[in-house]
Image (cartoon, grey):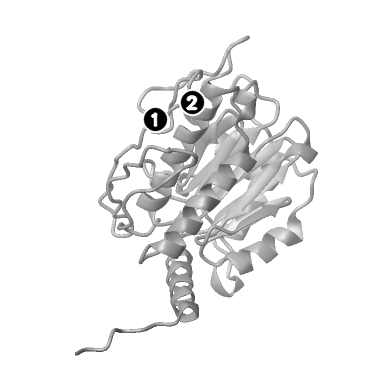
């Protein structure tokens, strides 16, 4: 009779953690940092279809590194969780803290019970009425939650980039200064050799403190280029990315065909299901389980993020 193969629990958990960390390290880094007017997200991402930074709810943003199909499942499940809670109770009851706790339960359960952990690391951020009210939560593959202050760097050369951001970060940064600091960190590369990252190669978004209700806004094109060039803030009536100016007394309009577009009174979103013929992006079908008490995931295979 063959003896059953035995692995100690300690070794099993160590192997799973090493596997997840290696998968996350292959992804390009994401920088999330607070500035005077809100919270900024930046990453090197030439794809216009596969977003690593997205809106979850009115004043809550989401950023991730790792396997695209896995963190896209988490994003969609988080949107459904937030939408259900806001509809059942009140929109103010949807908080980054509650969403982070729900994500932690999902990630922790998968890490312990499934044969393969999720190769993802995510940030859930909420902009408050005052800088002291901002919340930034970092969640790792095993469900560990960290309440971060000021900035977070994850994926790729996170430690090296984190030191770069720490040297230049301060609480009163303008938007332009914050973005230039984030892009400089992303371009520092291995061995500290700097490189220039063009605006077209970046995915950038902000949670703006002064926007009515829906704070999330993408920055693209000339608006982003101007901010990176001189730090000047875009004009209040100038559209940035796929968001049009905010009409008086109502939520912002959204242009059609954008994967993150959702109705203002529901903030609902469906998985995009988009695929790209890129050698580093091989997303699987990003369907998500219907959430109960918190977000869940379905499917664990797919390519590493770009």
Q: Quadrant of the N terminus?
A: bottom left
Disc 2 versus disc 1: distance between alpha carbons?
A: 14 Å
Between 209 and 76, the one lying in front of the other is 76
Residue 163 lies in quadrant: bottom right
Of callouts 2 and 1, which one flags the residue occurring earlier in the amino acid sequence? 1
Question: Which numbered circle lies on residue 197?
Answer: none
Q: Is residue 212 above or below residue 222?
A: above
Across and down, in percent, residue 136 comes to 66, 47
> Which residue was labeled with disc 2?
267
- Disc 2 secondary structure class: loop
Q: Nearer the viewer's eye, disc 2 or disc 1?
A: 2
Tell whether 240 sits left or right of 286. Answer: right
**Residue at position x 40%, y 82% in the image:** 7
Between 132 and 161, the one lying in front of the other is 132
Across and down, in percent, residue 102 comes to 54, 45
**Residue at position x 45%, y 33% in the image:** 80
Tell whether 236 sits left or right of 7. Answer: right
Q: Is residue 19 above or below residue 125?
A: below
Q: Quadrant of the C terminus?
A: bottom left
Between 224 and 103, the one lying in front of the other is 103
Across and down, in percent, residue 25 comes to 48, 67
Across and down, in percent, residue 266 comes to 48, 21
> Which residue was labeled with disc 1?
258
Q: Residue furthest left?
A: 1
**Residue at position x 44%, y 71% in the image:** 16
Q: Is residue 65 above or below residue 11?
A: above
Residue 113 lies in quadrant: bottom left
Tell whether 287 sits left or right of 213. Answer: left
Q: Is residue 234 above or below residue 45?
A: above
């Amino acid at each position: 009779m063959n003896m059953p193969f035995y692995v100690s629990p300690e070794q099993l958990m160590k192997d799973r953690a090493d596997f997840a960390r290696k998968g996350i390290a292959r992804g390009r880094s994401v920088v999330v940092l607070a500035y005077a007017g809100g919270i900024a997200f930046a990453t090197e991402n030439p794809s216009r279809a596969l977003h690593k930074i997205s809106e979850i709810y009115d004043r809550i943003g989401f950023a991730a590194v790792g396997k695209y199909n896995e963190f896209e499942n988490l994003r969609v499940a988080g949107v459904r969780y937030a939408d259900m809670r806001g509809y059942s109770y009140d929109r103010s009851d949807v908080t980054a803290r509650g969403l982070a706790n729900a994500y932690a339960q999902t990630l922790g359960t998968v890490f312990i019970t499934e044969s393969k952990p999720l190769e993802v690391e995510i940030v859930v951020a909420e902009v408050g009425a005052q800088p002291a009210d901002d919340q930034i939560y970092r969640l790792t593959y095993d469900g560990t939650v960290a309440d971060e202050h000021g900035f977070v760097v994850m994926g790729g050369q996170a430690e090296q980039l984190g030191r770069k951001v720490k040297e230049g970060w301060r609480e009163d940064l303008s938007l332009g200064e914050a973005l230039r600091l984030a892009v400089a960190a992303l371009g520092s590369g291995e061995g500290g050799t700097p490189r220039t990252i063009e605006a077209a190669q970046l995915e950038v978004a902000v949670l703006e403190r002064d926007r009515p209700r829906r704070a999330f806004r993408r920055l693209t094109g000339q608006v982003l280029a101007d901010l990176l060039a001189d730090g000047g803030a875009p004009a209040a009536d100038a559209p940035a990315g796929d968001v049009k100016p905010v009409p008086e007394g109502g939520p912002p309009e959204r242009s059609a065909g954008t994967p993150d577009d959702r109705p203002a009174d529901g903030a609902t979103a469906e998985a995009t299901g988009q695929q790209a013929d890129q050698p580093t992006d091989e997303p699987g079908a990003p369907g998500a389980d219907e959430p109960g008490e918190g977000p869940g995931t379905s499917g664990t295979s797919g390519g590493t993020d770009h």
